[in-house]
Image (cartoon, helix red, strand yellow):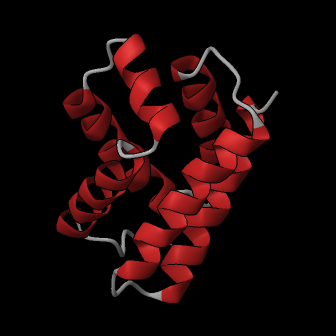
């Protein structure tokens, strides 16, 4: 799969997503408690999404699993994962993106989220 999501689109996804996610009480307080730099988080998310859009091979998926578990040494609950994924899906659906891109991205995110579930 070629990079069919332009950087400007990725930037917009990330901005819209975090605008929504930081309004969720759990994520807002978690970010505050952990002293999360939201701008750094957004920067990493941009790279993450660009990587996921280009992921096709099992080698790429192994690298993505490694990166996710490295950056997320904690586990999350299925309920919190659902909020995160639902927020991402809502964000993607608000944008005029190719359906196959949305499906591929959400599939990759669901797969990786399952790697950090309790």
Q: Position of residue 42 (x, y in %)?
A: 28, 40
> Which residue is most to the front?
25
Q: Residue at x 77, y 41 (%)?
A: 78
118 or 47, nearer to the observer = 118
45 or 90, nearer to the observer = 90
Side of 80 where 97 appears, left or right: left
Q: Position of residue 50 (x, y in %)?
A: 37, 54
Q: Residue at x 41, y 47 (%)?
A: 21
Determine the image quadrant of residue 11. bottom left
101 or 85, nearer to the observer = 85
Q: Residue at x 25, y 22 (%)?
A: 37
* Res. 57 visible in picture: no
Q: Position of residue 98 (x, y in %)?
A: 44, 87
64, above or below 88, in the image:
above
31, above or below 61, in the image:
above
Q: Residue at x 61, y 61 (%)?
A: 56
Side of 80 where 1 appears, left or right: left
């Amino acid at each position: 799969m070629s990079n069919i999501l332009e950087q400007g689109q990725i930037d917009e996804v990330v901005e819209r997503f975090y605008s929504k996610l930081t309004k969720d009480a759990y994520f807002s307080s978690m970010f505050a408690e952990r002293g999360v730099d939201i701008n750094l988080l957004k920067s990493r998310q941009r790279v993450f999404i660009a990587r996921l859009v280009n992921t096709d091979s099992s080698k790429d998926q192994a690298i993505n699993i490694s990166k996710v578990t490295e950056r997320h040494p904690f586990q999350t609950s299925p309920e919190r994962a659902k909020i995160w994924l639902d927020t991402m899906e809502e964000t993607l659906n608000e944008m005029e993106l190719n359906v196959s891109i949305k499906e591929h991205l959400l599939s990759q995110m669901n797969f990786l989220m399952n790697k950090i579930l309790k």
